[in-house]
Image (cartoon, rainbow, N blue to C red):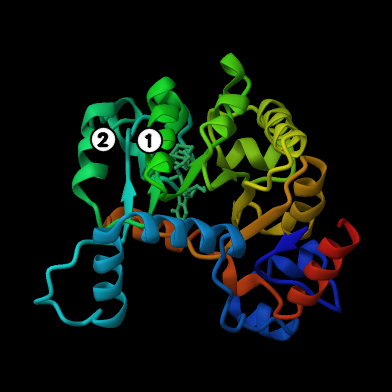
Amino acid sequence: METQTIDSENLATPTQLTPASDAHAKMIGLRPLGPLPIPQPDFELYRSTLRGGLLRHPRRLFNYLLAKYYPKAAWLPYLPTKLDIEPLSRCNFHCIMCPVSDWPKYQRAGDMSFEDFKKLIDSQYGLTEIKLQGLGEPLLARDTFFQMISYARSKELWVRTVTNGSLLHLNDNYRRLIDADPSEVQVSIDGATKETFEKIRRGSKFERVTENCGLLNGYCKEKGLVRTRMWTVIQKENVHEFLDFVPHAARMGFPRMTYALYLSGWGDEKWSESNSRLQAKSMLPENLRFRLSSSARILG
Ligand SMILES: C[S@@+](CC[C@H](N)C(=O)[O-])C[C@H]1O[C@@H](n2cnc3c(N)ncnc32)[C@H](O)[C@@H]1O
Ligand code: SF4
């Protein structure tokens, strides 16, 4: 299994991971982490998707070259090459660090129709990749979500999406999602135990999501595909389980996982402030990095 952040020699105990104060953190030898790696997509697949799309779409190629070689020339008429698209904003969870929790009925706008999505993709001929989800749970869009993925893939775009994993068992969604051919699917797992998971991911059922991840990963394995990644946002409420996430990911069959150590405020003052209180990066010992990669190697 590949992890993309931290590990170590001297494994910190849970008590060491949660120092009472900055002074305590210093006293027990915790130091801030150095520069962190950025999560990378599957290199081979990414390159072949990009190359195929550029070779078969001359306008995309021209746009890509302008954007790549003249990125600062604002007067050049190139279009975005990457786009985040939020097909809906509704959610069936209300996680403690996510602004969705504040919205009336956990929704901030209506859903995007497939026709509008298609228009957007067709007009943005410069695109090479999209992330299909912002805030909200994309599987609530049902068939439209799968249709969007398939359409974007038919245009040879790199399509990454993110789900909370709660609806994968319904209507064979785990199969339909993979059959729509996304380039990468992230599943958000913020607790390695039921208690922590359900405390952060309010409205969730740990057992349901765990089982669903098994279904998704099992189906990928059956089809010989490596498409999934577990995504864990480290914060005060789960930092004590830091080392438990790797075996948890392996048990659910994830071939890759990422630790995200920064909590965003999503451009909102209130959320910036409340999420700054949840940040846990400073609680992590620097040498965790080695420990994690050896643990991942042992788990294959
Ligand atoms: C906003 S969610 C949308 C997709 C889906 N509902 C889910 O939870 O996976 C996308 C990702 O953002 C993460 N996230 C939520 N709030 C965050 C915050 N304040 N800072 C950083 N990541 C956050 C979630 O854990 C999830 O991995
Ligand atoms: S499941 Fe995703 S979108 Fe919904 S509240 Fe949690 S982080 Fe936000």
Q: Which residue is mark 1?
A: 151
Q: Is residue 9 above or below residue 233?
A: below
Residue 137 at x, y percent in the picture: 44, 33
Camera-side residue: 287 or 73?
73
Give the structural element (helix, strand or loop) at label 1: helix
In this image, 151 relative to 224: left or right? left
Residue 37 at x, y percent in the picture: 58, 74
Q: Residue at x 51, y 32 (%)?
A: 180
Q: Type of residue at label 1?
A: Tyr
Measure how far apart labels 2 and 1 are at the Cα level: 7 Å
Q: Which residue is mark 2?
A: 118
Q: Residue at x 56, y 25 (%)?
A: 176
Q: Is residue 14 above or below residue 88?
A: below
Camera-side residue: 154 or 6?
154
Q: Type of residue at label 2?
A: Lys
Residue 165 at x, y percent in the picture: 59, 33
Camera-side residue: 78 or 198?
78
Count residues near mark 1 (Cα–Cα under 10 Å), then give few for <14, some for 14-19, many for 20+: some
Q: Are marks 2 and 1 in contact (CB under 8 Å)?
A: yes
Residue 289 at x, y percent in the picture: 74, 75
Count residues near mark 2 (Cα–Cα under 10 Å), then give few for <14, some for 14-19, many for 20+: some
Task: Name the residue at the top extreme.
Answer: 171
Q: Quadrant of the C terminus?
A: bottom right
